[in-house]
Image (cartoon, rainbow, N blue to C red):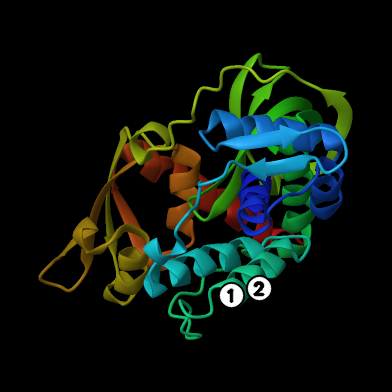
């Protein structure tokens, strides 16, 4: 990922008096052209980098510029390491693990050695997820188009996109990209993507509209749901919607109220409770659940 490489280059320049573009290219396994672009980006960010040509030349930070690492406390370092460790859980290589070792080696007085936060972002799909993330990260860094097969409720299609951001949200990974087919920015779920490949064709970065990932935007509601649940399902309602989503009736049953966005998802969710749930409103949902159950009965009555 480009941001990680920029941080790595800055770390090298702060620790070494001078280095060269070929040395950085070999160290970070990218081209010299990529390193030159990275140096330009660091300069634009306000880092006073100077370059010198010829014998004895190279890349260095201007005299007098220093970053005082004592501004980081032990707790700060633990949070940094926890973040790197979480990224390593979906990495297809050991890059973040190596980066953690570098930080720990250079900041041993700040790291207590006792972890208090462990984050695993890999979900159940690590084996298929890691190579997708690695390919997309490379494509974002190199500004290359990617192509993949996408499986959506509306059907299957082949997409070619300009990748911009990897997003972890709602317990899943997504790609925020400009879709050449739709001529607009789209959010693609990685678990629905197959055959992700770089095309080798570069693209010019456009002005990126950041995705609105607020719950109100993605799940605007609209379906007012009332349902009764058996008392032994309280743990699940609390886990999925919190303690304020229901009230307890005198008979112990739980009156659940919520705004739902998608009718099909709502019906599927209710059916996972079996006979432990009954929808009261809206009537349309009751009818659809009844029709679904009748169709299921027919399937199981076949000989």
Which quadrant would residue 53 be assigned to in this image? top right
Image spot of residue 64 (x, y percent) = 51, 47
| Image x and y of residue 290, in percent | 45, 48
Residues 274 and 131: in front is: 131
Name the secondary structure under disc 1: helix
Depth check, front residue: 214 or 205:
205
Q: Indicate the quadrant where residue 122 lies.
A: bottom right
For marks 2 and 1, give the CA distance: 5 Å
Q: Name the residue under label 1.
A: 104
Relative to 245, 62 lies left or right = right
Residue 125 location, x and y as percent? 70, 61
Residue 136 seen in this snapshot: no
Give x and y (percent) for residue 35. Answer: 77, 38
Query: Which image quarter holds the C terminus?
Result: bottom right
Of all residues, the one furthest to the front in this rendering is 55
Circle 2 packing at 10 Å, graded few (<14), some (14-19), many (20+), is few
Query: Residue drawn at (80%, 40%), measured in percent from left and top?
Result: 57
Q: Residues within 10 Å of mark 1 (few under 14, many from 20)?
A: some
Q: Residue at x 77, y 20 (%)?
A: 203
User: On screen, 264 above or below 204?
Assistant: below
| Residue 241 in view here | yes
Check if mark 2's residue and mark 1's residue have beta carbons within 8 Å: yes
Mark 2 secondary-structure assignment: helix
Count of numbered labels shown in the rendering: 2
Q: Residue at x 43, y 35 (%)?
A: 218
Residue occupying image coordinates x 59% and y 22%: 185
Q: Write down the residue under mark 2.
A: 101
User: Please, which residue is most extreme toward the left here?
Assistant: 250
Residue sitting nearer the eye, 146 or 216: 146
Q: Which mark, residue 193?
A: none
Say left or right for 74 vs 222. right
């Amino acid at each position: 990922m480009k941001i990680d490489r920029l941080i790595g280059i800055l770390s090298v320049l702060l620790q070494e008096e001078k280095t060269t573009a070929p040395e950085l290219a070999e160290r970070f396994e990218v081209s010299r052209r990529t390193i030159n672009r990275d140096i330009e980006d660091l300069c634009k960010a306000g880092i006073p980098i100077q370059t010198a040509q010829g014998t004895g030349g190279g890349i260095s930070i201007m005299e007098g510029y220093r970053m005082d690492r004592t501004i980081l406390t032990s707790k700060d370092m633990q949070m940094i390491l926890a973040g790197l460790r979480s990224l390593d859980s979906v990495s297809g290589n050991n890059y973040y693990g190596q980066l953690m070792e570098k930080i720990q080696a250079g900041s041993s007085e700040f790291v207590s050695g006792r972890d208090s936060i462990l984050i695993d972002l890999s979900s159940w799909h690590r084996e298929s997820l890691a190579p997708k993330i690695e390919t997309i990260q490379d494509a974002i860094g190199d500004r290359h188009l990617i192509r993949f097969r996408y499986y959506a409720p509306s059907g299957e299609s082949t997409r070619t996109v300009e990748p911009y951001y990897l997003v972890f949200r709602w317990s899943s990974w997504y790609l925020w990209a400009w879709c050449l087919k739709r001529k607009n920015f789209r959010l693609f779920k990685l678990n629905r993507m197959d055959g992700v490949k770089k095309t080798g064709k570069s693209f010019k970065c456009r002005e990126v509209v950041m995705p609105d990932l607020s719950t109100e935007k993605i799940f605007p509601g609209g379906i007012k749901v009332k349902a009764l649940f058996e008392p032994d399902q309280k743990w699940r309602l609390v886990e999925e919607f919190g303690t304020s989503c229901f009230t307890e009736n005198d008979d112990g049953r739980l009156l659940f109220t919520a705004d739902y966005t998608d009718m099909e998802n709502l019906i599927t969710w209710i059916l996972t409770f079996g006979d432990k749930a009954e929808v009261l409103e809206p009537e349309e949902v009751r009818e659809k659940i009844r029709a679904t159950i009748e169709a299921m009965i027919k399937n199981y009555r076949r000989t």
